[in-house]
Amino acid sequence: MQAIEGEMAQPGFWEDRAIAQGKVRELETAKGRLGEYTRLTAAMDEIEVLFQLADEEDDEETRAEAEAALAKLDEDFERARVQFLLSGPYDNSDCFLSLNAGAGGTDSQDWTEMLLRMYTRFCERAGFAVRLVDESPGEEAGLKSATLEVKGRNTFGLLRGETGVHRLVRISPFDSAARRHTSFASVTATPIVPEDDLVISEDDLKIDSFRAGGPGGQHMQKNETAIRITHLPTGIVVGCQNERSQLQNKLTAMRMLRAKLRALMEQEQARKLDELRGELADIEWGHQIRSYVLQPYQLVKDHRTEVEVGNVQAVLDGELWPFIWAWLETAEQARF
């Protein structure tokens, strides 16, 4: 930290804003890790005192309190250990989480809405600020697509492993014959990058405005406040309709576009590295990373880490930490 603070004190530090902002993020991450270490060691000292009191007074209630606190501290230590695995250039950034229905018709759109609820619950439990910035309802039920903005410490680093195809197997509530259906939806996490990190030419943009549409009736707006932006060189399309004004929707959509372009650049760099290594990057749409099976048995399995959880409802309620921890460890091992 002292080295970074020394760099920040030098004249001309802010001349290259992209590099300077990267250093600021690096310093914030280091301070956060030091603060977490200090908090955990202080908690450990307090628990040690509780155990000493329990032994001296032979107090079972105090001992039970100390054991419960120790169990909670074990979880906190595990999360802190995983946080140290976050070493990517944007791991400490906020992020957008985009969900898109895939093969499976209405079932997949319903599955997309279920995933939206799952990630919203996870973010709320983790203490992240989360809000819905765009959604496209399905014709009969569910969502064709949705985008969440997630803010908090290391949100991109923690959620980037969720990028990929998620598969659901269940008895379809939309099938009168009660047959088992398989549905797919894709999840994409992209880091929210500073405006100076990526300059986008206005000539490369096609901007359309339209009326924000929800379920209809009072949810329909009379003014064309919703924004859709197409980046002509790449064909990337982003939209936002949940802000209060057209300007706010445009600003949010531009942040989404900048995040997607940065992610695309990172993918291209990774692909080139894989080619140099003689490897093929597996970024195909049909590559499922996780399966959620409700019928004929109940199991959630991550196909990259082999982690399995039998309590499907807990996972759908946002308990994703076992998968996130395992993926981060696997990703870290793959670097060496």
Image (spheres, rainbow, N blue to C red):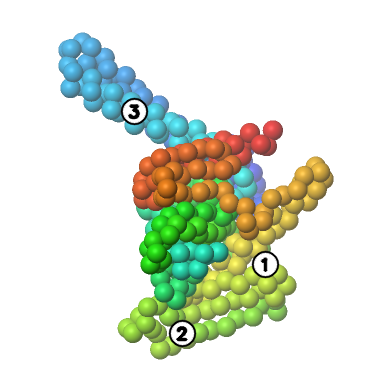
Give the CA separation, mark 1 to mark 3: 48 Å
Q: What residue type is labelled 1?
A: Val
Element carrying mark 2: loop
Q: Which residue is drawn at 17% across and 16% down?
A: 59
Left or right of 19, for residue 161: left
> Which residue position holds label 3?
71
Rendering quarter of residue 64: top left
> Which residue position holds label 2?
211
Rendering quarter of residue 299: top left
Please state which of the two labelled residues, at mark 1 or mark 3, is closer to the viewer: 3
Q: Residue at x 61, y 72 (%)?
A: 237
Q: Is residue 283 above or below residue 203?
A: above
Residue furthest toward the front? 177
Quarter placement of the N terminus: top right
Residue 155 picture location, percent across and down: 49, 50
Quarter placement of the C terminus: top right
Q: Which mark is residue 124?
A: none
Left or right of 238, for residue 121: left
Q: Which amino acid does label 3 sit on?
A: Ala
Q: Residue at x 51, y 54 (%)?
A: 167
Q: Dot 2, how many residues are within 10 Å of its Cα: few (below 14), some (14-19), or many (20+)?
A: some
Left or right of 207, for residue 81: left
Q: In this view, does 242 lie above or below 311?
A: below
Element carrying mark 1: loop
> Which residue position holds label 1?
199
